[in-house]
Image (cartoon, rainbow, N blue to C red):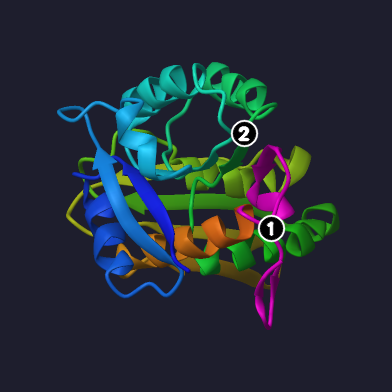
């Protein structure tokens, strides 16, 4: 039996990609969507308790204000970047009643890259310098991106400098370099289609529906040969 899924930010580019992905998804179907011109209401969620947020920082704030008034347990994937620490703290408080997963990037490649960085950061103690560069299309507002900040967190106290480039129409690219005296390790992830985020969101929602009430991050999601665990 398929699960109805609500998209907050349904008119955005990733929201539209998710609608397309839902047309052939085996476990979810599109229950409806909300955006700045289509506010979320109690009637909106009459058919579902599962929400994916691909809106904006302002759109996320509107969703938060709505969810704070909802008693029925919800499953909420936060795929929006540029959120303030105050917003994230409010979502942690909301998770006392709901299941909330904060995923600044929904792609499988970024999930694997984050694990590789945890291993590679040992090179810093062996004399390597660490630098990060991220490139996004010209209209992306937050810099550094939420993905870049998430990847930087995997490096712990190294606190690498992040060079943010905005231009053109391409999707996200994140490159981390470990620069040694006689060798260089480069780890790079490129998004070639917004469908990467849409398909990843569906995988993450499947994972979230297996969890108990609480606040989760990508650090708690493991990738195995059988999928996410």
> Is the residue marked by circle 1 packed among few (<14), some (14-19), or many (20+) residues within 10 Å?
some
* Residue 131 place in picture, x, y as percent: 57, 51
Is 176 positioned to the left or the right of 202 in the image? right
Is 81 positioned to the left or the right of 117 in the image? left
* Residue 58 place in picture, x, y as percent: 33, 23
Circle 1: element type: loop
Question: Where 81 falls versus 176 (above or below)?
Answer: above
Q: Check residue 137 in the rendering and tell me which mark sits there, or answer none.
A: none
The magenta-colored residue range is: 209-229
Q: Nearer the viewer, residue 47 or 24?
A: 47
Q: Quadrant of residue 66?
A: top left
Which is closer to the viewer, label 1 or label 2? 2
Is 21 positioned to the left or the right of 86 in the image? left
Residue 182 lies in the magenta stretch? no
Q: Check residue 221 in the rendering and tell me which mark sits there, or answer none.
A: 1
Q: Nearer the viewer, residue 184 or 11?
A: 11
Instruction: Identify residue for label 2.
Output: 98
* Residue 21 place in picture, x, y as percent: 31, 68
Circle 2: element type: loop
The C terminus sits in image quarter: bottom right
> Is the residue marked by circle 2 packed among few (<14), some (14-19), or many (20+) residues within 10 Å?
many
Question: Where 65 falls versus 57 (above or below)?
Answer: above
Write the residue at 73% across / 52% down: 220
């Amino acid at each position: 039996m398929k699960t109805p899924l609500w998209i907050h930010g349904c008119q955005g580019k990733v929201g539209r990609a998710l609608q397309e992905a839902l047309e052939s998804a085996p476990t979810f179907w599109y229950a409806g969507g909300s955006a700045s011109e289509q506010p979320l209401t109690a009637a909106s969620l009459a058919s579902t308790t599962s929400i994916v947020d691909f809106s904006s920082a302002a759109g996320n704030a509107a969703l938060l204000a709505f969810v704070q008034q909802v008693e029925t347990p919800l499953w909420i994937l936060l795929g929006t970047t540029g959120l303030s620490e105050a917003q994230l703290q409010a979502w942690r408080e909301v998770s006392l009643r709901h299941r909330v997963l904060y995923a600044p990037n929904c792609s499988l490649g970024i999930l694997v890259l984050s694990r590789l960085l945890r291993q590679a950061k040992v090179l810093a103690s062996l004399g390597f310098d660490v630098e990060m560069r991220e490139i996004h299309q010209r209209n992306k507002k937050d810099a550094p991106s939420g993905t870049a900040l998430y990847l930087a967190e995997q490096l712990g106290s190294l606190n690498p400098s992040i060079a943010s480039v905005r231009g053109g129409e391409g999707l996200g690219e994140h490159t981390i370099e470990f620069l040694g005296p006689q060798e260089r390790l480069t780890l790079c992830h490129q998004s070639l289609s917004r469908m990467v985020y849409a398909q990843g969101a569906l995988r993450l929602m499947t994972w979230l529906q297996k969890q108990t009430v609480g606040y989760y991050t990508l650090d708690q999601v493991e990738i195995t040969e059988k999928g996410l665990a």
